[in-house]
Amino acid sequence: MNKPLVGAFLAALLLGAGAAPVAQAAPAPQPQAREAAPQADPAAKAVTFAGTVALSNCSGSVVRSPDAAPTDPALVLSNGHCLESGFPGPGEVVVDQPSSRTFTLLNASGSGVGTLKASKVAYGTMTDTDLSLYETTSTYQQIEDSYGIQALELETAHPTAGTAITVASGYWKRTYSCDIDGFVHRLKEGRWAWKDSVRYTPECRTIGGTSGSPVIDDATGKVVAVNNTGNESGQECTDNNPCEVDENGEVTVREGINYAQQTYTMVPCIGAGSKIDLDREGCALPKP
């Protein structure tokens, strides 16, 4: 995984005084300049940090389904491996678990403008995908009225190879630009396996702390995936070294390549009032 980070001193140094201690070790290279982006659609808006959040040890974003109402509780998207309760085991699904976690909401320039508070983990898993959804105590309208920040909309369709994307990390206040290189039948890392994962082109060199960052389609501004892992040292299918497994069971290792989990699959699972309903038509997320 693009691991959560460790060390209150590091967090305070990089994020400012008052950052909470964080949970798990990861390398912390100096942030680099944003990689050059592919030529953008002239009609596309530049991707910013607006709507992203910083967790104590990961990144995330305020997201909404296309049918969300302004009065619905806002949802925060991150990774399953960023849950405060630790990594869910294979086959484990967390639903409606009380939480008081807080998130620093960022504006377009990456400045913190407020704090959002969770009421519960609405959903979390590392089975087939690697995502968490927190329900917050604020509505979408309250967030917009208080901070002028709109939630990022979730794409409802499978993305396509060659799409220009930006990974926006609220933890590091850093963006990564590249393309979707393709899709992986099974991405295996240690005890976990994920389906139909997004593989980036090499320009997206994500690091520890970028876990949970939204992957944004540059042309539409919609979230198409959630950043979660990369092969750090060329090992095969070990922790922090995921391998690709195709339909015939053939294994491929791509050292230095990073990956994300698609998010269109969770849109059918979000009902009225931002409630996660795993029995809704079209919902294919793993159940407890």
Image (tube, helix red, strand yellow):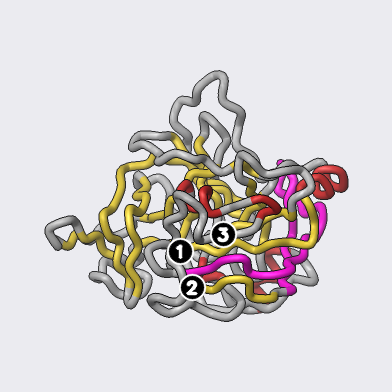
Q: Which residue is mark 3?
A: 277
Labels 3 and 2 touching (C-beta < 8 A): no
The disc label shown at residue 130, or none: 1
113 within the magenta span:
yes
Q: Quadrant of the N terminus?
A: bottom left
Task: Determine the main secondary structure of the stretch shown in magenta.
Answer: strand
Callout in the foreground (3, 2)? 3
- Whole-number angstrom distance, CA of label 1 to CA of label 3: 18 Å
- Whole-number angstrom distance, CA of label 3 to CA of label 2: 13 Å
Image position of 192 with respect to 205: above or below: below
Q: Earlier in the sequence, mark 3 or mark 2?
A: 2
Please, which residue is most extreme toward the right here? 146
Labels 1 and 3 touching (C-beta < 8 A): no
Q: Residue at x 48, y 77 (%)?
A: 88
Please, which residue is most extreme toward the top here? 42
Type of the residue with mark 2: Val
Helix, strand or loop at label 2? It is: strand
Q: Residue at x 48, y 61 (%)?
A: 207
Q: Nearer the viewer, residue 184 or 21?
A: 184
Q: Which residues are magenta?
A: 100-125
Helix, strand or loop at label 1? It is: loop
Q: Residue at x 67, y 64 (%)?
A: 14
